Image (cartoon, rainbow, N blue to C red):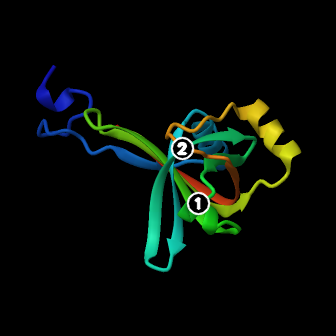
């Protein structure tokens, strides 16, 4: 096979640039359901903050846990971004999903017990993470990079 005929290369044999495709909301939710680590983004008086968090999905709602004394817990009931991605640098492929929504503290003990049973969400970091937060999306978008 000639160099220009190899899969994933252009006519000069250079790696082909992967195509960028928009994802449907259903594809985005499917990708989110398989993830465990994301970044929650919110505004502070010092500017935007992006924090890595472990999370779970219940339906179309993102669930995470944080400490009562954290900056995130102090800024609940506000708009947030939530982003999850995956990349294979060697293959130059990957995807990214962005949720824009509202973060709210889960106050009902009954709802917390249900979330514990549904998600099994356990914080990875040490320390108390007793504040359950749910992000209810009002917009979701995503892109996939593939060759």
Q: Which residue is drawn at 68% across and 61% down?
A: 103
Extreme residue in the bottom direction? 45
Mark 2, Cα crowd under 10 Å, few <14 / some 14-19 / many 20+, is: few
Q: Which residue is drawn at 58% across and 60% down?
A: 69
Disc 1 target residue: 69
Image disc number at residue 37: none
Q: How many labels does the image show?
A: 2
Task: Return the x and y of residue 75 as percentages of the image width and height.
Answer: 62, 69
Along the viewing direction, whichever of 82 and 3 lies nearer the viewer:
82
Disc 2 target residue: 127
Mark 1, Cα crowd under 10 Å, few <14 / some 14-19 / many 20+, is: few
Cα–Cα span, label 1 and label 2 = 11 Å
Relative to 100, say whether 84 is above or below: above
Task: Return the x and y of residue 14 as percentages of the image width and height.
Answer: 14, 39
Relative to 47, say whether 143 is above or below: above
Along the viewing direction, whichever of 53 and 1 lies nearer the viewer:
53
Q: In which quarter of the image is the C terminus?
A: top left
Along the viewing direction, whichever of 125 and 9 lies nearer the viewer:
125
Q: Which residue is drawn at 63% across and 36% down?
A: 33
Relative to 125, say whether 1 is above or below: above
Element under disc 1: loop
Report the side of 85 relative to 107 (left or right).
Answer: left
Task: Return the x and y of residue 4 as percentages of the image width and height.
Answer: 16, 32
Task: Return the x and y of residue 121 as percentages of the image width and height.
Answer: 65, 35
Element under disc 2: loop
Counting residues from the start of the chain, the first of labels 1 and 2 encountered is: 1
Report the side of 4 relative to 54 (left or right).
Answer: left
């Amino acid at each position: 096979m000639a160099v220009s005929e190899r899969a994933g290369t252009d006519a000069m044999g250079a790696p082909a640039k992967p195509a960028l495709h928009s994802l449907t909301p259903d594809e985005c939710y499917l990708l989110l359901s398989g993830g465990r680590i994301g970044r929650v983004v919110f505004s502070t008086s010092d500017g935007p903050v992006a924090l890595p968090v472990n999370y779970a999905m219940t339906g179309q709602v993102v669930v995470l846990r944080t400490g009562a004394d954290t900056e995130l817990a102090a800024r609940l009931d506000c708009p947030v971004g939530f982003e999850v991605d995956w990349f294979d640098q060697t293959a130059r492929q990957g995807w990214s999903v962005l949720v824009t929504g509202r973060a709210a503290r889960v106050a009902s003990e009954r709802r917390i017990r249900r979330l514990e049973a549904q998600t099994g969400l356990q914080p990875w970091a040490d320390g108390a993470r007793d504040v359950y937060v749910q992000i209810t999306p009002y917009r979701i978008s995503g892109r996939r990079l593939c060759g």
